[in-house]
Amino acid sequence: MLGLKLPTDPRWVDIVKKNIEEILVDHAYCEQKAASTAISFIIGFPEKTELVQAMIGLVTEEMSHFKMVHDLLIERGFELGRERKDEYVNQLMLFFPKGGSREDHLVHKLLYAALIEARSCERFRLLSEKLEDNQLARFYKNLMISEANHYTMFLQFARNYGGRKKTDQKWKALLAFEGELIKRFGTKEMMHG
């Protein structure tokens, strides 16, 4: 369903199991960045009323996810800690060339968002199935459903604004790039690392 070209190395879950605090901190920041991305769509494309409406809802949802992760950190005696660079996202964002039309920029940004949500969904599924910590397994199963909805929403908006055929060509190319990129990730206690 997600179209990812390469699944996450299952050993990534073993890294997570040994570093729950680190993954929760990184996850909290991922949720905060997702809310920031939604806000950036509102600021950057205010004339896209349907997109703005969807992003208003997404900001609220992502911040509620941030709160849930932050509450888990506190409950377990951890602190939020400092934000870490997300090299996966930084590398992914190099795929589409800079410049181009405003519409192209919007479509590219929507495709990046869709792919990040798809990879997060896949990783949440792994955590929901492989973690022995029942609380966290349930938590990630519930979040997996939200991420899948976000992925399809972003992809649909990209198709609406960029045209189905042209956007699907870009999507396929981005998926192939991400499939090669992900080979270098999954070795750190980070959601995408």
Image (cartoon, grey):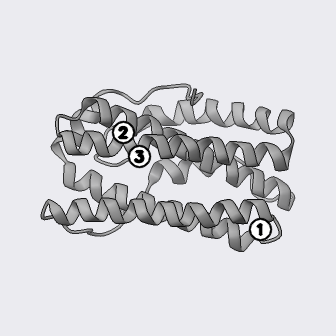
Q: Nearer the viewer, residue 5 or 41?
A: 41
Kindly state the secondary structure of the residue where label 2 is placed. Answer: helix
Give me the residue at 34% from left, 43% from top: 140
Judge from the rendering whether residue 149 lies leftward or rightward of residue 29; answer left or right.
right
Amino acid type of the residue tagged 2 in the rendering: Lys
Q: Which residue is mark 1?
A: 45
Position in image of residue 183 (x %, y %) = 45, 31
Residue at image coords 54%, 49%: 91
Distance Cα–Cα, label 2 vs label 3: 5 Å
Residues under numbered marks 2 and 1 in contact, where contact means CB atoms less than 8 Å apart = no
Residue 6 in the image: above or below residue 117: above
Circle 2 residues within 10 Å: few <14, some 14–19, many ≥20: some
The residues bearing labels 1 and 3 have C-alpha atoms spaced at a distance of 27 Å
Q: Is residue 14 above or below residue 68?
A: above
* Mark 3, secondary structure of its residue: helix
Quadrant of res 165 = top right
Residue drawn 71% across and 36% down? 171
Q: Amino acid at mark 3?
A: Leu
Nearest to the eye among marks 2 and 1: give it: 2
Q: Residue at x 29, y 60 (%)?
A: 25
Amino acid under disc 1? Phe
Would you name the residue on which mark 3 appears?
143
Q: Earlier in the sequence, mark 2 or mark 1?
A: 1
Residue that mark 2 sits on: 141
Name the spot of residue 76 as percent of width and height, x first.
Answer: 14, 59
First-in-chain label (1 vs 3): 1
Pinpoint residue 14: horizontal percent, then vertical percent: 22, 34
Residue 27 figure quarter: bottom left
